[in-house]
Amino acid sequence: MATSVRTYEVRTYGCQMNVHDSERLSGLLEDAGYVPVADGVVPDVVVFNTCAVRENADNKLYGNLSHLVPVKADHPGMQIAVGGCLAQKDQGEIVRKAPWVDVVFGTHNIGSLPVLLERARALDEAQVEILESLETFPSTLPSKRDSAFSAWVSISVGCNNTCTFCIVPALRGTEKDRRPGDILAEVEALVAEGVLEVTLLGQNVNAYGVEFGDRSAFADLLRSCGGITGLERVRFTSPHPRDFTDDVIAAMAETPNVMPQLHMPLQSGSDPVLQRMKRSYRQERYLGIINRVRAAMPDAAITTDIIVGFPGETDEDFEQTMHVVREARFASAFTFQYSKRPGTPAAEMPDQVPKKVVQERYDRLIELVNDIAWEENRRLEGRVLEVLVSEGEGRKDERTHRLSGRAPDNRLVHVAVDDTVGIPRPGDFVVAEVTYAAPHHLVADRVVSIRRTRAGDAGDAQRSPDLASAGDATPGVLLGMPAVRA
């Protein structure tokens, strides 16, 4: 007797690397015959792709697992799998704390998930498989992407740094680099499917090439992406200031499809704190990189990560961070209050900063970051930008319907829908004038033109099989006035 098709749901926590891994997990499950669960229906398999970096990651995972106990009791045959960084860290501890979990797998063997699920069903017992080194490079596995026009491409995994606040190297391993030919072949295949934008991923993306001894490999890779016909936007994340070299700045500035955007973690502006963090650069070097990027790309948007309250941080240390924020004028910043991570050297350091002090500093930092971001956004009022429309609707009011998208520098833009020009789809480009700036987004209500793309057609085909396939599209069809690049 034939068995019914089993459904799945993947819940993702953490960084872009986890998002990329979840696309692979979904692809693997669909290759194995599973289908995505419908809204409002209990899935046969729930996969948690976890993060060990975020605060209270353990509590959040076990809280979510506890919520599934009665659900699983009411749905015989339901399975729960836990993967990602927290699974790599806790390993067998997960099934001890949550014995209703069926499968635990690590960061190095995501390709094993379908087999582990079947084995757990056949043997009626939990399966825990944690490898200590990479089994298969994630990007070689099947993928189920949510976007028809944008894709992640992993160029390396792991990290050779030893930052005292970070547990990632212990969970993802030392850096492993893909060969440039394999990366470019994947990008070309994605573009053939209609993808317009790729983001190159690595824990320390600009250290790419260290494994095969080529210090110029990352800059060369960016330039090679510039030669791929149909690839309109290239981004990357996240670089480390220690490895950020002038050849990368030149490659960014001289390669038209590499976007004028840089996310470069600062963590602290204080040299003594950076030394305790083992960040291997100092304030002067960081600001020097910012200045050289701005000299080569005056309109580049620079974003960062900042930790407040690292052990031993004094008032003067914090003021140095505020100084760098004022000098760098970040378009935005991901800000974090330091919290202990078991297994990291920083967790055992003396002079932990009191919570009240950390909160006061954090509030001041947020206010400064937001003020500068708003000032920088207001400089763009009246500018004409080319926006790649993304999934989902943007902000609405009583008079205007808007769609959301990203400018070349990755700023979020809410674009008006103008029926006289045409209706853009996710994956199409809209050229529009910025009419209002807020701290975290721009509004562009004066639409100049729309450029329909193969990616937009591919998205239509995903949403409705009756619509024309991506192969029927004509690249660069314009509605309205000729497109203008920002």
Image (cartoon, rainbow, N blue to C red):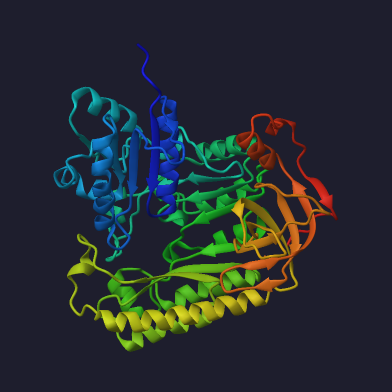
* Residue 75: percent from left, percent from top: 29, 33
Direction top: furthest residue: 1
Residue 394 location, quadrant: bottom right
Left-right relation of 270 to 479: left
Identify which residue is drawn at 46% across, 46% down. Answer: 155
Identify which residue is drawn at 42% across, 24% down. Answer: 33
Direction left: furthest residue: 96
Identify which residue is drawn at 72% across, 68% down. Answer: 434
* Residue 260: percent from left, percent from top: 62, 62
Considering only vertical position in the picture, is 321 above or below 206? below
Left-right relation of 213 to 235: left
70 and 262: which is toward the camera: 70
* Residue 305: percent from left, percent from top: 43, 68
* Residue 115: percent from left, percent from top: 30, 27
399 and 151: which is toward the camera: 399
Left-right relation of 391 to 130: right
Identify which residue is drawn at 65% across, 60% down. Answer: 407
Instruction: Say if residue 173 shows up in the picture.
Output: no
Residue 124 location, quadrant: top left
17 and 327: which is toward the camera: 17
Considering only vertical position in the picture, is 17 above or below 377? above
Look at the image and tell me in which quarter the C terminus lies.
bottom right
